Image (spheres, grey):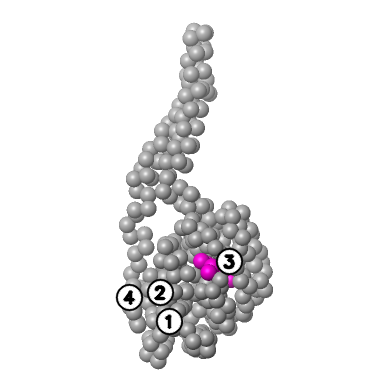
């Protein structure tokens, strides 16, 4: 199969028929062997009913329905598991991503051999204060931390080589940092394409201010996991050693001072409590490192979701 299109969605029953018909037209015009995977993230409207109707009329349309809302990362992860195409393209269901961008993204993966191509919505129709300015800040921060030169990490319109999506695990709220996950998994050829951003036609945005706080915390998390997930002792052991040595050095100083001057009161000195605290903290960090080494990357159920129904899969 040439192409899989993965679309996570929440309460988008109005836009789905138009979106799927637009994708079908583009795919048939370019002679793609394709599938559309719609992941309903616990919608409370008629989204699943619409998906079932669309699947009946077009067997290339497949659906996954969660029992409750898990978030966009969960939807993408399940969609990636089900995808069979050599090229996988993700997009949002609100019609702000244009299916006319599919051939260009497909070409960059299939012919130019990129591992991942991220869309860049250079001209946006979102609110400048609540979305555009915070997005620019987080994109700049992510570029600096990750070293990946992309302008729009959070753009839902992306294209992947199949091996990429089968090699990474998207959980929590990590969908914003899939390029970072791909880089840490060894995929180096990451590109960017300017794409059209369309005004929202139906419904309202599903994201609030909390996504920016979560985004910053996720960036810290993915940076730590990417660097130290296989060797957590390198992080905890380093800081544990520094704290322990600092505490030990102060303790040695206090003991020598006591030997030189018998009137020197060790327990009345702030240094005594500082050294004691530093030694205890150092030992705790060492212990945390050992425990992290034992459980690293083996947490059961981290990507287990309750799926109520499937169609076409």
Mark 3 vs mark 2, foreground winner is 3
Q: Is residue 15 above or below residue 87?
A: below
Number of the front mark, 3 or 1: 3
Residue 50: percent from left, percent from top: 42, 86
Q: Position of residue 91 (x, y in %)?
A: 51, 75
Marks 3/4 in contact by CB < 8 Å: the verdict is no
N-terminal of the two: label 2 or label 4? 2
Boundaries of the magenta span: 113-119
For the question of whether residue 145 can be seen, the reply is: yes
Q: Which residue is the site of mark 3?
A: 191
Categorize mark 4 by other alpha carbons within 10 Å: few (<14), some (14-19), many (20+): few
Q: Position of residue 2 (x, y in %)?
A: 45, 79
The quadrant of the image that shows the N terminus is bottom left
Residue plotted at (42% across, 45% down): 231
Is residue 135 or residue 128 the one in the foreground? 135
Which label's residue is closer to the chain start, 2 or 1?
Answer: 1
- At horizontal 44% and vertical 37% (from top left) the residue drawn is 237
Alpha carbons under labels 1 and 4: distance apart = 21 Å
Residue 135 in sight from this viewpoint: no
Q: Which mark is residue 308?
A: 4
Cα distance, mark 3 to mark 4? 36 Å
Which of disc 4 and disc 3 is earlier in sequence? 3
Cα gap from disc 3 to disc 1, whole angstroms: 24 Å
Mark 1 and mark 4 in contact? Answer it, CB < 8 Å.
no
Label 2 – label 1 distance at C-alpha: 8 Å
Corner quadrant of residue 41 = bottom left
Q: Secondary structure at mark 2?
A: loop
Look at mark 2 in the image and give the residue it sits on.
83
Cα gap from disc 2 to disc 4, whole angstroms: 19 Å
From what the image shows, is residue 94 above or below residue 234?
A: below
Q: Label 1, on which residue?
A: 35
């Amino acid at each position: 199969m040439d192409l899989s299109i993965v679309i996570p969605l929440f309460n988008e029953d109005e836009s789905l028929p138009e979106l799927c018909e637009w994708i079908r037209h583009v795919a048939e015009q370019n002679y793609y062997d394709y599938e559309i995977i719609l992941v309903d993230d616990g919608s409370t409207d008629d989204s699943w009913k619409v998906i079932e109707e669309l699947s009946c009329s077009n067997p290339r349309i497949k659906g996954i329905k969660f029992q409750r809302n898990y978030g966009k990362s969960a939807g993408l992860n399940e969609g990636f598991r089900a995808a069979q195409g050599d090229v996988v393209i993700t997009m949002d269901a609100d019609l702000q991503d244009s299916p006319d961008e599919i051939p260009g993204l497909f070409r960059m993966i299939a012919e130019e051999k990129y591992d991942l191509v991220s869309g860049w919505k250079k001209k946006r129709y979102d609110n400048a204060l609540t979305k555009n300015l915070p997005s620019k800040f987080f994109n700049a921060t992510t570029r600096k931390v990750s070293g990946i030169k992309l302008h729009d990490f959070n753009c839902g319109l992306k294209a992947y080589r199949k091996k990429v999506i089968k090699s990474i695990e998207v959980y929590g709220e990590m969908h914003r940092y899939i390029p970072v996950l791909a880089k840490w998994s060894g995929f180096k050829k990451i590109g960017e394409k300017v794409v059209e951003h369309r005004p929202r036609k139906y419904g309202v945005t599903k994201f609030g201010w909390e996504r920016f706080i979560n985004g910053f915390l996720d960036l810290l998390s993915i940076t730590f996991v990417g660097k130290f997930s296989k060797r957590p002792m390198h992080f905890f052991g380093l800081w544990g050693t520094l704290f322990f040595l600092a505490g030990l050095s102060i303790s040695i100083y206090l003991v020598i001072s006591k030997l030189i001057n018998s009137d020197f009161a060790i327990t009345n000195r702030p240094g005594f409590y500082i050294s004691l605290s530093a030694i205890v903290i150092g030992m705790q960090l060492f212990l945390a490192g050992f425990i992290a080494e034992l459980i690293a990357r083996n947490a059961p159920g981290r990507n287990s979701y309750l799926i109520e129904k499937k169609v076409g899969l």
